[in-house]
Amino acid sequence: MTEVEDTGKNNKNYVYAFNGRGQQRWRTDLPSGGMTRIAASSKGFYCTAGGQLHRLNAEGKIQWSRKLPGSVDARGWYLAVGPDDTVYTDVSYGDYLFTSGDLFAYRADGTLKWKIGQGAVDSIPLVKDKTLYVGSYDNHLYAIDTTSGGIRWSTSLSGDVADPAMIESTLAVSVSNSDALYGVTRAGKKSWTAAGRTVGQYGRTAAFGHLFVTATGKIFATRTDGTSAWEVTRPAGKLNADPWLSDPAVNGTTLICCSDNSHVLGIDTTGKIVWTIDTKEKAGSLSGYAPLIVGSRIHVAGDAHILAFDMPHT
């Protein structure tokens, strides 16, 4: 996990590691400014802070750091790691995450593999079979060769393109400020459009031959042909102006989501809620991040707490 601590003079960024019993294994201090989420690789972690991209090994030691263009607030908000441990990152700035428009690829040893400018990144890249798929503020979905950085193709959509996901051999993407979900072939051809499933979206996960989109307190299941399989609304509870369900984690045949009313939900492949856990007393409000599943335990982030509990039996 990551944490930003205000010392009164400067903000300090920390990366923590905990064992399965919740005991701290190590803590690594990073430069202040522009802290972002962690992206895991096969042998360690990547994150950004202080205008730099950092690689940490499994023991938390910083192996290398590379300066990102811009100020100490520069960060790679949209980090992704390929199967060869190449890390792909944009460069964003400030509280509103203004993006530079560049996309960088760094090898595991810290050398720059390539850099391209392709209209300002607006999504976490998806890496599949030596191709990187990424959405942009210029209303395009791009397919990029992970070896050379060359653009294989681009497809124009109706708005800022959010995180792509793969349902079998179809890319499913949504656009900001719209309720449209698009199906795009791996050759870049639009194959279907579905409406009414993405406004206020929080996450997208592909599993069981479906795409699961969480939006405005609901989870929508979409088939590979764009037709709706089912939708589920989070159980009633405290009403918020912006209800949400997190990006779902997958455990066996169960989708697991956090909700804005301090519950964790288990949902089966037919859209039935099979269990709920109230975390308010122990964790307070939950974050919008997906739960982390390790073995038979579920881990969720709350108000300055991490809560772990055993997987309920269904």
Image (spheres, rainbow, N blue to C red):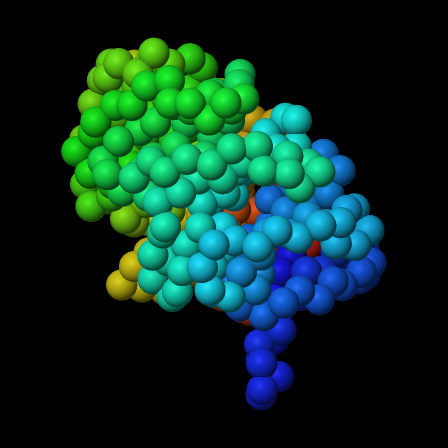
Residue 304 visible (yes or no): no
Q: Nearer the viewer, residue 64 or 225?
A: 64
Task: Give coordinates of residue 119: x percent, y percent.
Answer: 29, 39
The answer to whether 257 is drawn above or below residue 4 in the figure is: above
Total marks shown come to: 0
The answer to whether 200 is drawn above or below residue 26 in the figure is: above
The residue located at (41%, 48%) in the rendering is 245
Residue 84's quadrant in the figure?
Answer: top right
Task: Give coordinates of residue 155: x percent, y percent.
Answer: 25, 23
Task: Give coordinates of residue 34: x percent, y percent.
Answer: 50, 63
The residue located at (30%, 59%) in the rendering is 242
Among all residues in the image, which is located at the extreme bottom?
A: 8
Residue 122's quadrant in the figure?
Answer: top left
The answer to whether 73 is drawn above or below residue 290 in the figure is: below
Q: Nearer the viewer, residue 43 or 73?
A: 73
Task: Give coordinates of residue 78: x percent, y percent.
Answer: 46, 45
Residue 181's quadrant in the figure?
Answer: top left
Is 21 left or right of 159, judged from the image as shown? right
The residue located at (65%, 57%) in the rendering is 1
Is 111 left or right of 247, judged from the image as shown? right
Which quadrant is the C terminus positioned in? top right
Residue 138 visible (yes or no): yes
The residue located at (49%, 39%) in the rendering is 104
